[in-house]
Image (tube, rainbow, N blue to C red):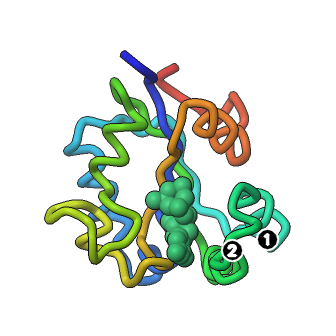
């Protein structure tokens, strides 16, 4: 077991398009257990802080505006090798390049509005999970 949890977001476009249920079903069917879940609308400073690693990127401002355009669903997901398993389930960042059957291939509207976020390392999963959830909000641990 390389790491046992990851942090995920169902992004505003997927919430607006009423895909929460279908995305959660795919997550559960892929073997993940939901350890924590909440729907929130991020403030601009929160979204800027969450995406701080991308602050020098040309897509940063657009990404922040998109992520505060509506509510999101924040999730902590448990599974063996959760980071890699979840990145496989969601597919490539760009839905045009994402593999058939992946969450982004099915639900993304564009490279920016790509339906879901998934942590890219155990260190970032820990930071991102703590950004949204206290220890009292996490189960199955
Ligand atoms: N993104 C974008 N334009 C780009 C690359 C990324 O708008 O050219 C957005 C997209 O929503 C992506 C997020 O920025 O999910 C974070 O980018 P990253 O490279 O970390 O991709 P991810 O880890 O989400 O696959
Ligand atoms: Mg990333």
User: Tag 1: Cα neighbours inside 10 Å, few (<14), some, or many (≥20)?
Assistant: some
Depth order, front residue of 1/32: 1
Q: Is residue 9 visible?
A: no
Element assignment for label 2:
helix
Q: Position of residue 92 (x, y in %)?
A: 34, 61
Q: Earlier in the sequence, mark 2 or mark 1?
A: 1
The residue lying at 44 percent from left, 24 percent from top is 4
Of badges 2 and 1, the one in the foreground is 2
**Residue that protrudes farthest toward the right in the picture:** 45
Q: Is residue 107 above or below residue 49?
A: below
The residue lying at 53 percent from left, 43 percent from top is 7
Q: Is residue 40 visible?
A: yes
Whether the residue carrying mark 2 lies under 8 Å from ligand 1 is answered with: no
Q: Position of residue 133 (x, y in %)?
A: 68, 41
From the viewer's perspective, tell me whether residue 116 is left or right of residue 102. right
Depth order, front residue of 119/131: 119
For residue 56, which quarter of the picture?
bottom right
From the viewer's perspective, tell me whether residue 140 is left or right of residue 41. left
What is the number of the mark on residue 43?
Answer: 1
CA gap between label 2 and label 1 equals: 15 Å
The residue lying at 19 percent from left, 62 percent from top is 99
Depth order, front residue of 135/10: 10
For residue 38, which quarter of the picture?
bottom right
The residue lying at 46 percent from left, 74 percent from top is 15
Whether the residue carrying mark 1 lies under 8 Å from ligand 1 is answered with: no
Label count reads 2
- Which residue matches tag 2? 60
From the viewer's perspective, tell me whether residue 77 is left or right of residue 128. left
User: Tag 2: Cα neighbours inside 10 Å, few (<14), some, or many (≥20)?
Assistant: some
From the viewer's perspective, tell me whether residue 38 is left or right of residue 87. right
Q: Position of residue 64 (x, y in %)?
A: 69, 75
Q: Position of residue 127 (x, y in %)?
A: 69, 38
């Amino acid at each position: 077991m390389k790491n046992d949890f990851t942090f995920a977001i169902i992004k505003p476009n997927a919430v607006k398009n009423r895909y929460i249920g279908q995305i959660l079903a795919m997550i559960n069917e892929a073997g993940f257990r939901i350890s924590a879940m909440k729907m929130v609308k991020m403030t601009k400073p929160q979204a800027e802080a969450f995406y701080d690693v991308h602050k020098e990127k040309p897509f940063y401002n657009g990404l922040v505006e998109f992520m505060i355009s509506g509510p999101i669903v924040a999730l902590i997901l448990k599974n063996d090798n959760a980071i890699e398993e979840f990145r496989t389930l969601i597919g490539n960042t760009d839905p045009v390049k994402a593999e058939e059957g992946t969450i982004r291939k099915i639900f993304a509207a564009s490279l920016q509005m790509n339906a879901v976020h998934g942590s890219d390392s155990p260190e970032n999963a820990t930071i991102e999970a703590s950004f949204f959830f206290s220890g009292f909000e996490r189960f199955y641990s």
